[in-house]
Every structure is written in structure tokens, then in C-alpha cells.
Amino acid sequence: MRILWWFVVLIGCAALGFASDPPPPQPVATLALHVPHPGQRELAWVTVAFSSSETSIAVGLCQKDCADNKCSLFLVRWEDGTLRPLAQTLRFDSGATIHGSAEGQILTVESAPPTILYSPDLSTEYNLPKYLSHVSPSGMTASESASGSWKLYRLTDRLEPLREGTGDLLSVSDEVVLIQDGKAMNVETIDGQRLGSFSASNEAWDYQAGLLGNNKLYLDDCKSVRVVDFEGRTQLEMHPRKGCSLGDTKSSADGKRMLFDFTNRKVSGLQNVLESVRTITTLGMSGEEDVNREQVRVVDSVTGRLCFDWHRSFPLTYSQIRSAAISPSGEFVAIAAENTLSVYRLPAVCEGATIKTGK
């Protein structure tokens, strides 16, 4: 026990000697969002999306207390380097995702139908009687999935059937779809023409896989992220983070820049050692699941170089924090932290550290 105690003390002291995190990048524009109870309720859900034209940003925020959630959907005008409030509605639920759509419309997808399509000023709602499993970057193509089958739709002010098929549809653009059929990964055009196919081991695609533009894919096994062509040939392998979570990866419209938005738990060296000892002695039954840190990174999917690295800390919470989006052009990142929306400009050429492990 004495040896264990001295080990804990040494680890804790060593942690104090580590350099502090570098300051985060500075935004080019910020806007305070009007929430009903600022600072009084914990944020239970945050999600952000650019419109397909990049002229507006939608933000969904949900606050919680012991009784219920209070949610709002905000629409913010983003033009000439300025953020201006445009519209707000209370018709929004925790867990919903936001997508830009044609002609400035906003699409919100919840865990059950209906899917809601809002007009560009949020004044009009269209209820679409489907649960949409995937939406293209433009918001003009969407899919509905069932066990082992799927349907594709063109989205206007309603869902117009395009095609249906078997297997598990993993990702969709306006031109290309990615379908998993057993261990086969098939890439096809919207009308069914085969563009590529390969066999992948379970660990290579079992958690996340998606299109990057219309000529490559990413495969994420929670240990590394591989960028591959339509025949499965690896173009880049990266380790952008530890672990992964569904929905924490987004990309620019051309797929050349990937955004990773993930949360983790960061505590002092001494507390980390004590928690590790407790986890070991309880055979993993008391592992910590709450988080207090978010990190947003943007990586060039061709060179593997870091374009953007932002982080923040907050009180320990079990809430889902996914507060960042990359613009379709790959020029901007929007982040909603607390009740403030911030926009950051990315460099024309990414010259940060290389996080690739192979090519």
C-alpha cells in the first residue's frame, strides 16, 4: 500500500509539470443567442449546421433541469463577416439533427417521424411522414432505412421517390450512395450504376463509414480513420482523436476537409490514477462516463495536416455535446458554446501538424 501511495503521489506531481493547453483560435464573428434561462440550466443538446448556400447557420439548443427540457431552434444570417439573428422557434427537440436544404430551407430529423422542413425564415413548417436515416450535404437527397433495405428520395417541399434497394445504406450524396451488403462495400450512382466495390473487415467499417465528396470514402473503426478510394485502396490513414462517437465526423462538400467534434474526460493526474485504480479493483464496473471537455479538429483529407484545433472545458456532464459544423466550402467552422455562436475562418492551406500514420 505504501508503494502504491508513493506511485500515486509521483504521478500527480508529474501531471502538474505538464504544459498547459495552447489558447484556442479566435473567432471572426460571434453572436449571443437568446435563451430563456442563460446560466441557470445545463445544456442537454447542441447541434449546428450551415445552409447549403452558406448564407445562414441553424443552431438547435436544449436546456434541462430536474423537470424538463426547454429547446429552441435559431436561424442566423451569415454574410459579409457578420452574424445577425434572423428567426427563432421553440419547435425543436433534444436529439434532433439539423441539415441545410434547397433554397435556404432547414431540415430537422428526429428519432421518429415526422421530419420537419422549415421555410428559410422558420415561419412555415412541412411535416414529412418519414424518419430519414441519411441526408446529403445539400439536403436535396435523403434516405429511409429499414432492416436490410432502404429507399431514396429527392427532397423539395415533399419526398419524391427515387430508388430502393437491399443492404444497409451508409451514406448518400446527390450523385453517389454507399451501401454495405454483408462484408461488401458497394459504391453506386443514384440510379444504380456500380462505381466501385471492395471487401472490408468488420473492424474497418463496423462503426462509421461515409462519402467524402464524390470520389472517396472514410472508414472509422474508433482507433484510426482511413481515407480510401472506391476500390478500398488506402490513400491516407489518420489518428485524429481517441475513441469515437456516432455523428462526430463531418466534411466539406468536396470532402477535402474533415471535421471531428468529440468529447472526453480530462482530470488531474492524481484523480485519473485514483479512478483507474477504482476501475481495476471493481473489474470495470465503476468506470467514469461523464465528460468535461470538447475538442474540434479540422484535418485536410489529402495531406493529413491539421487546419484547426479548438477545445474547451466545462463542468462534468452526461449531456451530448456536439456543437460544431464545417461550411460546405470548407472555409469556415461554426461552434455553439453555451449561448454564443462563433464563426472561425480556416486557412486557405492547412499547414498544421501532420496526424497521418501512413499513405
Image (cartoon, rainbow, N blue to C red):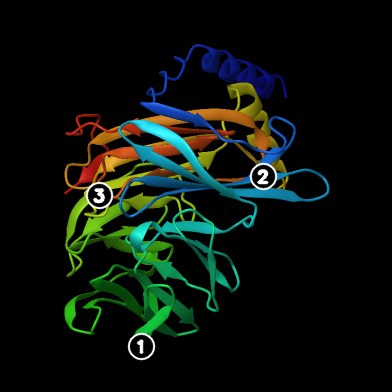
Query: CA–CA distance between discs 2 and 3?
Result: 31 Å
Q: Which residue is mark 1?
A: 165
Dividing the picture into quadrants, the one containing residue 92 is: bottom right
Disc 3 or 1, which lies upstream in sequence? 1
Disc 2 versus disc 3: nearer the observer:
2
- The image shows residue 123, relative to residue 167, as above or below, that is above
Disc 2 or 3, which lies upstream in sequence? 3
Q: Say which mark, if any, is on residue 231.
A: none
Q: Nearer the viewer, residue 83 or 264?
A: 83
Farthest residue in the right direction?
A: 67
Give the amino acid type for the residue marked by disc 3 in the picture: Glu
Percent position of residue 27, x then y:
39, 26
Q: Which residue is mark 3?
A: 237
- SS label for mark 2: loop
Percent position of residue 44, x then y:
66, 46
- SS label for mark 3: strand
From the image, which quarter does the N terminus lie in?
A: top right
Query: CA–CA distance between discs 2 and 1?
Result: 38 Å
- The image shows residue 145, relative to residue 304, as above or below, that is below
How many discs mark residues in the rendered view?
3
Dividing the picture into quadrants, the one containing residue 188 is: bottom left
Percent position of residue 280, x then y:
66, 42
Q: Which residue is mark 2?
A: 318
Residue name at image x 67 percent, y 39 percent:
317
- Residue 216 in the figure: left or right of residue 52: left
Q: Nearer the viewer, residue 238 or 286?
A: 238
Residue name at image x 51 percent, y 28 percent:
312
Q: Nearer the viewer, residue 314 or 254?
A: 254
Dividing the picture into quadrants, the one containing residue 78 is: top left
